[in-house]
Amino acid sequence: MDNITFFFVENQIITLEGEPRWEQQRSFQERLNEKPFLKGEYAELKKHLADRTDDREAHSEAKAAFIQRVLNMER
């Protein structure tokens, strides 16, 4: 047991194509690609959250609010 090494792997979500979560993620990515300024905002938000908190729940809630705002935007 002394030779065990742990690696941090970025959180990954596996979703089946066609499920509601899949469609939401696809739509979010499409909107980021359509509006580059949103990509920048999202990157800044993620950086700010990473620097500010170790609270995964607060981090997720803040990202969820941004994602919902993007999804609610007119195309």
Image (spheres, rainbow, N blue to C red):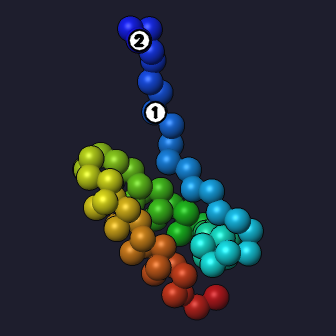
Q: Which residue sits at x=39%, y=50%?
A: 47
Quarter occupied by the N terminus:
top left
- Few, some or many residues within 10 Å of mark 2 (<14, 14–19, 20+): few
**Could you say which quadrant of the image residue 62 lies in?**
bottom left
Along the line of sight, the residue nearer the viewer: 73 or 54: 54
Q: Secondary structure at mark 2?
A: loop
Q: Earlier in the sequence, mark 1 or mark 2?
A: 2
Q: Secondary structure at mark 1?
A: loop
Question: Residue 39 appears at what percent x and percent y?
Answer: 55, 63
Q: Amino acid at mark 2?
A: Met
| Disc 1 to disc 2: CB gap under 8 Å | no
From this viewpoint, is residue 51 visible?
Answer: yes
Along the line of sight, the residue nearer the viewer: 75 or 50: 50
Q: Relative to residue 62, is residue 50 depicted above or below?
A: above
Q: Which residue sits at x=38%, y=8%?
A: 2
Q: Which residue sits at x=45%, y=15%?
A: 4
Q: Is 2 left or right of 43, judged from the image as shown?
A: left
Question: Residue 59 appears at what percent x and percent y?
Answer: 33, 58
Q: Nearer the viewer, mark 1 or mark 2?
A: 2
From this viewpoint, is residue 31 visible?
Answer: no
Q: Amino acid at mark 1?
A: Phe
**Could you say which quadrant of the image residue 31 lies in?**
bottom right
Q: Relative to residue 65, is residue 12 depicted above or below?
A: above
Along the line of sight, the residue nearer the viewer: 13 or 51: 13
Quarter occupied by the C terminus:
bottom right
Q: Is 46 left or right of 37, judged from the image as shown?
A: left
- Few, some or many residues within 10 Å of mark 1 (<14, 14–19, 20+): few
The answer for how far apart the CA atoms under marks 1 and 2 are is 18 Å
- From the image, tell me which residue sits under label 2: 1
Q: Residue furthest top?
A: 2
- From the image, tell me which residue sits under label 1: 8
